Amino acid sequence: MMHKDLLLGIDVGTTGTKCSVYDFNGKRVASAYREYPMLHPRPGWTEQDPSRWWDAVCCNLQTIFQSQDIDKNRIAAVGTSSTNAVFLADRQGQPLCNAISLHDQRSGPQVEWLKENIGEERIRALAANRIANGSFSLPALRWLVENRPDLIKGAHKLMVPCGYVIQKLTGEFTMNRPRMSLTLMADIRTGQWDTEIAEQTGLPARLLPSPCGSAEIVGTVTQWAASMTGLAAGTPVTGGTIDTVAATIGAGAVDEGDFALTIGSSGRLCSIAGQPMEDPRLLNLYGAYDGQYIIVQSTNNACVSLRWFRDTFGREAARQAQAAGCGIYPYLDRLADTAPAGAGGLIWLPYLAGEQSPVWDTRARGVFYGAGLETDYPSFIRAVLEGVAFSQRHCLEVVLDRAARPDIIPLGGGAANSPLWCRIFADVLGIPVARLRSNETETLGDIIIAAQAMGIHEIAPDFGKVLAADGEVFWPDDVRACVYDRQYRVYRELYQALKPVFAGGGEQ
């Protein structure tokens, strides 16, 4: 029988899905990625087509098995993670509607309904989180109750992205406990549903999937899924987790006091604690491992800011990059590096779709401030990179009210591909940043969790910490840090000055 010496991680992201295969030494031996669009059917609405997630998984895996010389029979298990989105499905797991994404802002009135009818204190006592749209599913689900009662009546289960992929692979309807933390309908300490809150919101308890642990085998790949993906039928599939949790574990943050920074579509600054933190500015997640809680500062528009800039203002740069035989993002990076630290006084507020941590303002919007006649294209690119870093500094200051300052922060996600961005983060945060050897921390975290489910002793729960020790370290530069200190003060003042303007702009 073929020796099973590989693990597969699947991460369903906001703008694309990545599938990667690792050996038991943590080496990535195959990988494929497929991008898809966010959908904006109305102002303030952001949706995703769930079928695109599954299509991306199938295409990626067919590429891995057919073009990258990976034998399906060597895959010991599949781990999954995903972004935040919610939708309703029928008994066959087919979507009844598009998924409402974390960037969606339609459910502001439902937030107020929940505060009035369920109560913020009750939700905080149960879930250790605030009532807000975007990060948390309950307002979006209440919106469906009010506006699409036909879907509620005909639905079999509510689903999230990795639960959808797991259902496609195994036929099982489940939701992992870290993801349950963000529904506001689960007890963060027990990991069980509170059906009373669901039913008070208008959701029948039958819609709630079966709870499961991240490091739990929930099923195996069916014959149908094997024919669609190329995986071997019978391959074990774990319960999955939130991309934030997977990335944190992949970065090596597993013990109390550890920190990790992941800059993907969203920005996520995470620390590990032994219990939830009582601060409404923070998100609390049930961890992938028993007794572990992950304290999160999550921002909406990290790499999304750069992608938006690319799509909106980058056509000429894309042509130049192609002519130079260079990818668009390395080319933008090269241009940004020609601008001085501080981008000549240009500042970017990265609030394209409102903001979560730490301001929690759904009406905030993206702003460039400080442009002059001398401001050039590279300065705009650099300002985007710096604005995202400023947002993470703002988050870090909130966490440090309750936690010790870390000596070093591992950095993963797409931003870690940019040495310039890594340097900017170190200078802005004033803390050394370690660019991980594998900055694809989500799929790495997936396979570390899957290894625990399978009892694979070569990969310990803190395996990511071993790999992080080999990361390239970027040290803060005192001169640039002084520039950023001045810019950061303006960044903070800008939001406060614009807050009433945002509030007076009407519902987006």
Image: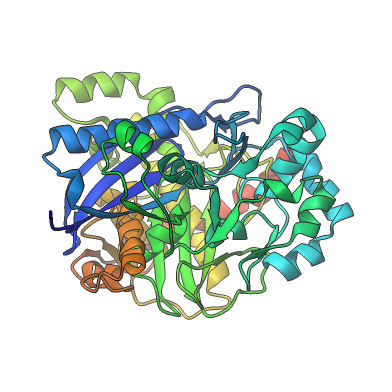
Whole-percent x, y for residue 373 in the image: 43, 28
Instruction: Indicate whether 219 appears above or below 127.
Output: above
Taking the image as shown, residue 211 lies to the left or right of residue 204, namely left
Whole-percent x, y for residue 164 in the image: 50, 41
Instruction: Indicate whether 167 appears above or below 58.
Output: below
Instruction: Indicate whether 399 appears above or below 491.
Output: below
Instruction: Indicate whether 339 appears above or below 77.
Output: above
Whole-percent x, y for residue 294 in the image: 51, 68
The quarter of the displayed image where residue 478 is located? bottom left
Q: Nearer the viewer, residue 468 or 421?
A: 468
Whole-percent x, y for residue 241 in the image: 46, 56
The N terminus sits in image quarter:
bottom left
Residue, x 76% and y 34% (percent of image)?
A: 153
Taking the image as shown, residue 149 lies to the left or right of residue 364, namely right
Colour theme: rainbow
Taking the image as shown, residue 226 lies to the left or right of residue 48, namely left
Q: Nearer the viewer, residue 420 or 291?
A: 291
The quarter of the displayed image where residue 88 is located? top right
Residue 344 in sight from this viewpoint: no
Residue, x 80% and y 59% (percent of image)?
A: 196
